[in-house]
Amino acid sequence: MIRSALFTGAPRPFMFKSSSTSHTSGLRPGPNNGQAAIAIARNVLREVQSSVNHQGMEKTLSPVASSGALGCVLANGRSPVMNTLKNFHLEPHKCEGLTVDEYHELIESGFLDHVRGELIDGFFIQMHPQCVEHVATLSFLFRTLFKDLENRAVIRDSKPITLMKLKSEPEPDIVIASGVDDDYNTRNPSPSDVLLVAKVSNSTLKKDSTIKLEEYALTGIPEYWIVDIKARNVQVLRKPQGNCYESKVTVSSGFIAPAAFPDVSIRVQTLFRS
């Protein structure tokens, strides 16, 4: 059961500070709403867009962001309505976010059935639709890796991995994990399982090379590929150290191969389908 607006305990205010004025306003959940579950991902998910209309809606709030913008889901019957707050910043010390377990409860309850997204640092982040070139590149990369690694590792596309300590469950475009498929019948891969994650980037390049990079490095994921559609190259990041990778090589020609499977090479330019 989702605990009273996602969290129990006495309701506390969460604060929004305008980015254009010095005005600070507090929003306090109503007596039946519990504590509003809103958090921020390392001070980077600050920009807030659009507006929220509370009229006629039950003010049950959960952490939602759209393309880096803080927002709220307001439950209206069974249909969540996505809204955001325009030109506001969230002061992170006032907030708490969803845990992975609470996120799973939301999924199982059907609350997020109509929204595609991922959990990042307690935030539910709405994901962009995939453009044609993104789909083509991802499909080619998945087919190539699956063909060569089918009996040696688990290859997953656009499926979640669980970063429990960071309150995150991102969905990389590609995951290479150790073991066999049956190992993940009742759980998602965790950092200790993951050999490589890859992201095909177009409009999401900034997020993929900052927020996602930091998440993967902090949890010790050994290798991260960023396939940059616009630049037609691949950033190969290895040796996680703190919140970054010690080794970063940008490859625009020749071949790349996972460090765990150096015999599985891919010609970089074949990834770009147009």
Image (cartoon, rainbow, N blue to C red):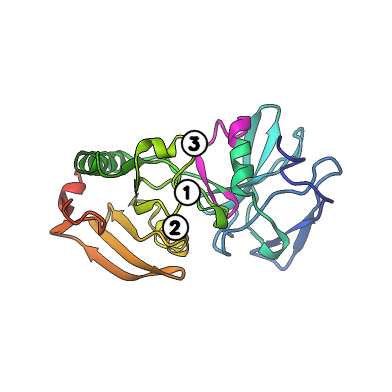
Is 26 in front, or is 29? 29
**Image: 183 above or below 47:** above
Residue at point 23% right, 58% down?
233
**Image: 183 above or below 94:** above
Rate crowding at label 3 as few (under 14), some (14 to 19) or many (20 or more) other CA atoms within 10 Å.
Answer: few
Rate crowding at label 1 as few (under 14), some (14 to 19) or many (20 or more) other CA atoms within 10 Å.
Answer: many
Upstream in the sequence, badge 3 or badge 2? 3
Amino acid carrying mark 1 in the image:
Pro
Residue assigned mark 3 = 186
**Label drawn at residue 212:** 2
Please, which residue is most extreme toward the top here? 78
**Label drawn at residue 170:** 1
Rate crowding at label 2 as few (under 14), some (14 to 19) or many (20 or more) other CA atoms within 10 Å.
Answer: some
> Does the magenta-highlighted stretch encompass residue 45?
no
Upstream in the sequence, badge 2 or badge 1? 1
The image position of residue 146, as x and y in percent, is 24, 40
Secondary structure under the numbered disc 3 in the rendered image = loop
Residue at point 38% right, 52% down?
194
> Does the magenta-highlighted stretch encompass residue 109?
yes
Amino acid carrying mark 2 in the image:
Lys
Q: Quadrant of the C terminus?
A: top left
